[in-house]
């Protein structure tokens, strides 16, 4: 298949496939002399797995590391992913039942469908399991090591500090990414990662900047602080890293 045919078959954009190729996440099986990419069955199977991991909130960098692990077990991964999707379907069924009941005149307010704790907990457990089994980056291992010794109160304090940094960015979405105030917020974010999770080199920072806008889950999470937050952070990183 050409890149256009692959995009149409799998429901992704040509731009996404080009980006996946550029970051070595999904390479075409052939590149012709004229530069045209050709995709086959192996590419389709790999993209299928990528989209499942992405649906569950995995960053693209981690998806690549997991799929490239020599110990990666696709069948086991699919079974766990199915369990998570069943939990999410159960939650959505509750929401639909509550809505249908309300449309029929029942004024009872049922909030069970809004409770995401079970699905969130299962997703977090699966993420930890997948990374522990197949993830092999020094950054992730260091992040896990630092996380292990923290209390719930310390985790909550870190979350507050992180949110405060993102709020700083959200308040400057109309500001030039090269502005000293934006760059100061970026350095605060880099130092936060470096201090509390893993050494954040310029190379790692540059990769994060791409991920914040290319990965829909990251973009949505950052933009809940204010529209344009993810784009501003990404642009500020591009300025800093000269990209």
Image: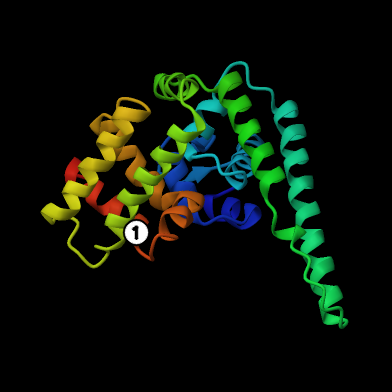
Mark 1, Cα crowd under 10 Å, few <14 / some 14-19 / many 20+, is: many
Residue placed furthest toward the left: 180
x, y percent for residue 133: 61, 19
| Front-most of residues 178 and 144 | 144
Using the image, determine if residue 88 lies above or below residue 171: above
Residue most extreme to the top = 71
Percent of width and height locating residue 18 = 44, 47
Question: Residue, x 51% and y 51% (percent of image)?
Answer: 217
Q: Quadrant of the C terminus?
A: top left
Q: Which residue is mark 1?
A: 229
Vertical placement of residue 165 versus 124, above or below: below
The picture quadrant where one finds residue 194 is: top left
Q: Quadrant of residue 73?
A: top right
Q: Percent x, y for residue 109? A: 77, 71
Image vertical order of residue 235 relative to residue 27, above or below: below
The residue that appears at 59% across and 50% down in the rendered structure is 6
Residue 26 in view, yes or no: yes
**Which secondary structure lies at badge 1?**
helix
Q: Residue at x 59, y 28 (%)?
A: 128
Measured along the vertical axis of the image, is residue 118 above or below residue 78?
below
């Amino acid at each position: 298949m050409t890149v256009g045919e692959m995009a149409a078959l799998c429901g992704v954009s040509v731009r996404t496939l080009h980006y996946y190729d550029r970051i070595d996440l999904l390479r075409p099986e052939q590149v012709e002399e004229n530069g045209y990419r050709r995709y086959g069955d192996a590419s389709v199977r790999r993209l299928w797995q990528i989209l499942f991991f992405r649906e569950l909130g995995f960053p693209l960098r981690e998806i690549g590391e997991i799929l490239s692990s020599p110990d990666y077990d696709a069948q086991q991964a699919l079974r766990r992913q199915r369990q998570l999707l069943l939990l999410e379907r159960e939650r959505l069924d509750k929401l639909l039942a509550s809505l249908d009941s309300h449309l029929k005149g029942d004024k009872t307010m049922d909030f069970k469908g809004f409770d995401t704790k079970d699905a969130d907990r299962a997703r977090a457990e699966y993420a930890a399991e997948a990374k522990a089994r197949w993830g092999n980056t020094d950054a992730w291992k260091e992040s896990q090591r630092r996380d292990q010794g923290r209390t719930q109160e310390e985790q909550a304090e870190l979350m507050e500090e992180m949110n405060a940094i993102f709020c700083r960015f959200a308040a400057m979405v109309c500001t030039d990414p090269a502005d000293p105030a934006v760059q100061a917020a970026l350095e605060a974010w880099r130092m936060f990662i470096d201090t509390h999770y893993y050494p954040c080199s310029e190379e790692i920072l540059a990769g994060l900047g791409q991920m914040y806008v290319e990965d829909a889950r990251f973009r949505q999470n950052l933009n809940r602080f204010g529209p344009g937050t993810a784009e501003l952070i990404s642009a500020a990183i591009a300025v800093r890293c000269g990209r």
